[in-house]
Each structure stands twice: as structure tokens, then as C-alpha cells.
Amino acid sequence: MREITELKELQKIELEMLQEIDKICRHYHIRYYLAGGTLLGAVRHQGFIPWDDDIDIAMPREDYEQFIKIMSHKKHPIYKLLAIECTKGYPYTFAKVVDTRTRLVEEIGKDLHQMGVFIDIFPIDGMGNQKEKAMQRLMKIIRLRSRIWEAALKKDEIKNKERNLKNQMIKSAANGLIKIIGIKRCYHYMMKYVKQETFQDSKWIASAVGGAGIERELIERKYFDNMIEMEFEGKRFYAPEGYEKYLTNLYGDYMQMPPKEKKSGVAQRKNMVEVENNIPEISIIMPVYNSETFLYLAVESVKRQTMKEWELLLIDDGSSDASGRLCDAYAKEDARIRVFHQENQGITKTRNRGIKEARGEFITFIDNDDELVEDIMEKSCSYAKKYRADIVKFGYRVEEDFPNGAKEVRDNCIKQQLIITREQCGEEYQNIYRSGYFNMIWNGIYRRTLFEDKKLMFDESVIMGYEDWIFNNQMYLIPERQVIMDYVGYIHYQRYQHSTSKKFHPNQIEANVKAAEAEYHLLRRMNQEYGTTFTWVLRATDYLIDILFLFERRGCNYGYRDKKRR
């Protein structure tokens, strides 16, 4: 762990968290709003308040509960949800999303929960239609949630918060009673009262966990009925359409800058913040099999990457040469390299092993005799974040040698970058197909949650060939957004004596049929969902021609009758 000392670094971590939360909310149609000082920063500074160090968002209760359900069931590789509904010992009546790569101990309740850098998520509840009753209701909810929170504190922490001895004794007694009844049971009792009024049916609403005071927290729902997009640190996030009324309620003349003595971080910078050094941005999966001659080039191309936040997973698939020992030696030299040894299982099972072991936000693949262009990981991860893309594909160069000693170099790369949403997949299919998108898996990076959420894996019945085609056809319609770069980022070597793509294996014919079936189902689905008019006959012909070329590969001993039968 290393300590974070710069405010900008802390803000960068929080902004990345907010982008991920925004992506999840948009995907599941969950309403949320920038709130409190975060919204003030967006309006006044188009980003963080320069001296501030936290992010707050708010959600109507119904959306808040949906968000908790999604985040508690879908395990994110980096971010974790803390909520009283699903986290044992968590005392707050609002949720936090925490970056698990970091560690932070809050001054209040420090023994209750050791957590990382976080974003607070506040529920907004209905308070009814009469202002006076709404204020009384809000007051009662605030008292209830305060008792629940304080019941989780230890006696010495109560003393620190409350100097009056009589009040200490009263609070300790009340808290003891709540502990006997059970904090979670008390929370459910509070929620029954909270849900007597709903956000949608109330004229007055409030975030009962806010600390600005009853009159300032209470606001008419009409100011939150619609969401608008607002710039924050160069990105676009949602805010309530009536943000002016909301900010005036909280801060008065909110465009007026505060005096110098009040310009200090509020939530997180007061405490020590540490970040792990070993959580990678991208996991690079390299299956290794009998590649002692070329393994060095492949590994060095990873180590030369301009982006340093990677991990390389070397998976030795039962090599009979020195490849396994070389993998171990590389891991000793660089802590970012991890090695796994297994009996020979084939390319698809080996890649699936890598997917299961990966820890990065993104995943990519490299063959054990190929090379990555030195800046491709940095560029592709940057594009993924810039465009909020789940997949970023890039061009590749093929360097092929032939039995007669001749060599050929050819680039496969589009001329103009494409940014494709799911709705555009049908109309852009031909351009994407011509880009070489479907041919390979190593010419792109993939958000790891795609594999986890959709349980995507390589077809392990395929031993050699076409596994990339099958996988890409199955993956194509899943991402919300994908980018195809007009940039060559990978060098693929087709060596006559070494490359598996030059050899024949009987399983390749079955794999060809599976690839054809996968594309047939993809085209049919696009025709149904997007109104495209793709015809299968031309593509089927291409697959048949591929089978004829397979019969010409080195190692094919089929006679004329066998070829005709197959």
C-alpha cells in the first residue's frame, strides 16, 4: 500500500467510480442525481469544488433499492457496495460504493468499518403533501436513523461526540435497548414508517440522512421530476432539473465563494488514504505451449507497454519444452507477472482459466509468439474510458513467412475510427465485419464484467481454430458501446513451422460449423431486432471455402473420399 497525498489523485479515483455508477444506472434505467457539494461543484466549477474531496449522489427510494439489489448480486472486480441491507455491521442508513483497491479509516466509527475511498449514495423519500406534517415526519425519521447509527458506536465514541454526562447516559441506555432489539430490526421498523409515503406520490421530499437541517433538506418533488445532464470534470452526469432551487435551499447564494477558512476537504482527506499498488487496470492473458523460442519476444512486448498498470497471466498448458521454466523466471523478475501450470488442455480451456484468474478492469489476450505495439494498452484503455466502451478493438499487422523463404507483411485496419452503440450494431455490421473484428480475439480489450455478467467463456469443445470467431459472434450484441480504432496495435506472426494456424486438426472442421452456426444466429437476430436484411447464403459459401482451404493445410492426410464425405 502507498499513501495518497495529492487531492487530484483522490478526485481521479472518485471520478472513475462515479463513471462506473453512472454506467450501471444508465444500463438499468435507475434515476440518480448529483447531490450536495458535488452538484454545487458541477454548477459553479464544472467539476469538483477545488478544495473538496468527496462525491455524493442521491436516488429516489425505489431506484435506490434497485441499485442496492443489483450491486449486491453482481460482484464488481473493483467496487464494493456497503449498505445496511446487505453488509453485516454496517451502521449507516445510506449506502456507500467503495474502491477496494484503497483503504481509509473514518474518524467517527473507525472501529466499525475499515473501508476504502467511497461515494455516498443517499435515498430520497416522500414526506407527504402537507409541508408542516412533512417537516414533522422528516424530524421523526432523522431521530430514528440517528439512534440506529449511534447504537453501533462504542462508549468512548459516544463520549467524544457528547460532552454532557446526562446526555451520554441517556444515549447509552437508548443505544443499549436498540442493540437488544437488534439494529437491523430497528432499521426495518424505521423503513415501514418511511415507506408510508412514496417519492412519486408526495408533494414534499427529502433525504432524511442529510445533515443540512430540516427546512433546508425539505423540497418540493417537482424540482426532481426531471433529470438533466450536467458537465462534471469533462464528463456528463445527471442532475435534478430544479437544481437552482435545491442549491438555494442548501446554501443560499450558492455562487458566492466561501471565505478562505472554510475551504477544506470534508470527508476523506482528513484521514489516511492508501491505495494498493498491485491491482491492475488490465489483465493480459497469454496461453503458453512449447514456445521457448519466441516467448521472450511476446513477454518483452508486454513489459515495454507505456501503461504500467497491467498484469500478465502466463498459463503454461503442459509444455514439454523449457517454456514452463521460462515463465517462472519471468515471474521472479516482475511481480506483475503471474504463472499457472496445468496439464495440456488446449487453447480454449487455457483462455478460460485466464479469464477466471484475471483481476483487471479489462481483459485482453496475446498469443505466445506474437507482439503488442508498445502503446496499445494505454491507448485502448484510454478509449474505453473516454467513450465508456465495453470493447475496444484495434487493427493488427500480419507478418507471414512461406516454405520457399518468401515473407509478406499486411495490415488489417479500418481507415476511420468507429464508435458503435448496441442500437447501431445492425447498420454497422458490414463495416465491422470488413474490419477483421470477428476473426481474432487478441485484437481488442474487453471489460471484465462482460464475462462475469453474461457467463461468457470460450467453447471448450473447440480444440484448435475458429474459437475466436465463435466467441466474437456471441459477444457482438452484448456491449452497450464499442470502439474500433484506426490504429495497428498488434503484430501477429504466421511462421510456417511454428504457427498453429498453418496446421491441420480434424476438430477444425467441427469448429468451422460451430462458427457458421454462431454467425447464422447473429444475422438472424439482427434481421429480427434491427430490421436488417442480411442473407446467409454468401456467408455460408465463405465457410465452405474455408473448409476446402483447411484440407490443404500441413498435416491433413485425408484422401479424396474422406474430404468429400466431410
Image (cartoon, rainbow, N blue to C red):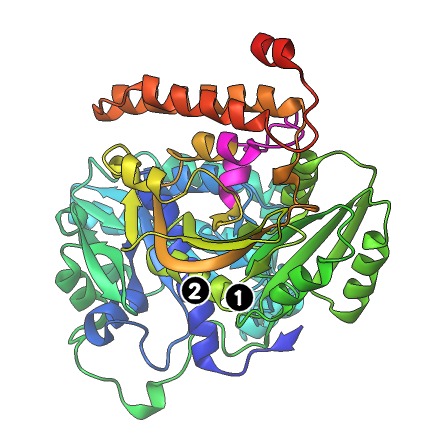
Q: Residue at x 30, y 38 (%)?
A: 422
Is 227 located above or below residue 49 in the figure?
A: above
Q: Quadrant of residue 351?
A: top right
Q: Which residue is drawn at 20% across and 35% down?
A: 201
Q: Which residue is drawn at 20% across and 56% down?
A: 229
Please state if 365 lies on the left or on the right of 264 as rendered.
Answer: right
Category of crowding for the residue at label 2, using alpha-carbon neighbours closer than 10 angstroms: few (below 14), some (14–19), many (at least 20):
some
- Nearer-the-camera pick, 385 or 250: 385
Is 301 located above or below residue 206 in the figure?
A: below
Is 393 located above or below residue 191 in the figure?
A: below
Distance from the alpha carbon under mark 1 to that under mark 2: 59 Å
Q: Residue 401 appears at what percent x and percent y?
A: 59, 51
Category of crowding for the residue at label 1, using alpha-carbon neighbours closer than 10 angstroms: few (below 14), some (14–19), many (at least 20):
few
Task: Give the mark count.
Answer: 2
> Which residues are the magenta region?
449-470
On-image quarter of the C terminus: top right
Dot label at residue 167: 1
Which residue is disc 2 drawn over? 379
Please state if 478 lies on the left or on the right of 362 as rendered.
Answer: left
Q: Which residue is drawn at 23% across and 35% down?
A: 427
